[in-house]
Image (cartoon, rainbow, N blue to C red):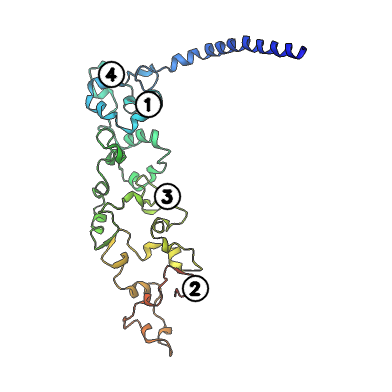
Amino acid sequence: MRRLLLCIGLVCLLFCYCPRTLVHAADQNGQQTAATKPVKGSATSPAAGYVGQEVCAACHTEEASSFANNPHSRLVLEHAGKGVTCESCHGPGKAHVESGGDPKKIFRFDKASVAQVNAKCLSCHAAAHPNFEHSPHGRAGVSCLSCHSVHHAAPATMLLKQKQPQLCYTCHQDIKVRFSMPFHHKVPEGLMKCTDCHDPHGTFSNNQLRTTADRNMICTRCHTETAGPFVYEHPVVKTGGCISCHDPHGSPNPRLLLVSNVNTLCLQCHTASMNFTEAGTPSFHNQSTQFVSCTSCHTQIHGSNSSDVFFK
């Protein structure tokens, strides 16, 4: 009986104490809640001259109407209206509004330097693109807005100004020529994209190739038959990689080979020696005739599980 009365007493005590605790906590947090409560549609607190996106939309109707389908606008909804809005990128708009729309009173991307534009974008996207400033694009002074358009691009294209590969071709004309070769990866046909192999925001690999543990994995994820592992590996595959023999963009030669004659390609490493003239050696090893391709016999040139000379 005593235990029952003790339990009832504890329950009553909790009910009496908890509301006071909650009210006390609410009182402690009241100032913080009021301070951080955003202005209707504002990107941040009412301090620092923010006016809210509804005020911006009153003049910038075209940008406001297209922003509803923008990936950035989803962040606004996800954060109860406190996410990415006009002033998150363009800065506080109070001075701009009170001056009657003076363009000098607001951050304008079209008037900003490349460094300023990239700093604005990377203030949110640095985690996704940590190496951009050290990438070839970053060092060449390429702006985020050189490829992306926040207000005038289809959302499904990652806000790109154009679809791939046309966007990449605007600078990389030499690569466009390679893709016009008789043998090429199916990028112009739309079966592949430049970004399947390259990360335009930068990697720690050469040519902005997507970083993998195995440097050849960019190729072998499609060309699985060459991936291995093999009992007998062709050293050049590990040391020089696929591009030692192949041009990844396009070539006039079958299999994207760098040279038209397979024997010439092989002899860049396997130079002629006295062994080719010894008695008993088959005549077709005499490379002066060049009648028989090396790969007629050495068929498993990417690696073999049965022969150290890459026979089947």
Mark 1 or mark 2: whose residue is earlier in sequence: 1
The crowding category of the residue bearing disc 3, from other C-alpha atoms within 10 Å (few below 14, some 14 to 19, many at least 20), is few
For the C terminus, the image quarter is: bottom left
Amino acid type shown at disc 2: Ser
| Disc 4/disc 2 C-alpha distance (Å) | 74 Å
For the N terminus, the image quarter is: top right
Query: At which x and y percent is residue 285?
Result: 38, 83
Considering only vertical position in the picture, is 213 above or below 67?
below
* Picture quadrant of residue 123: top left
**In this rendering, would 245 be left or right of 29?**
left
- What residue is shown at x 29% (from left), y 28% (from top)? 68
Tag 1's secondary structure? helix
| Disc 3/disc 2 C-alpha distance (Å) | 36 Å
Mark 3 or mark 2: whose residue is earlier in sequence: 3
Per the image, the residue denoted by label 4 is 55
Q: Residue furthest right?
A: 2
Per the image, the residue denoted by label 1 is 77
Considering only vertical position in the picture, is 13 above or below 54?
above
Q: Are marks 4 and 3 in contact (CB under 8 Å)?
A: no
Per the image, the residue denoted by label 3 is 204
Query: At which x and y percent is residue 78?
Result: 40, 27
Amino acid type shown at disc 4: Val
The crowding category of the residue bearing disc 4, from other C-alpha atoms within 10 Å (few below 14, some 14 to 19, many at least 20), is some
Q: Are marks 4 and 2 in contact (CB under 8 Å)?
A: no
Tag 2's secondary structure? loop
Task: State the residue in front, 298 or 274.
Answer: 298
Mark 4 or mark 1: whose residue is earlier in sequence: 4
Amino acid type shown at disc 1: Leu
Tag 4's secondary structure? helix
Task: State the residue in front, 73 or 171.
Answer: 73
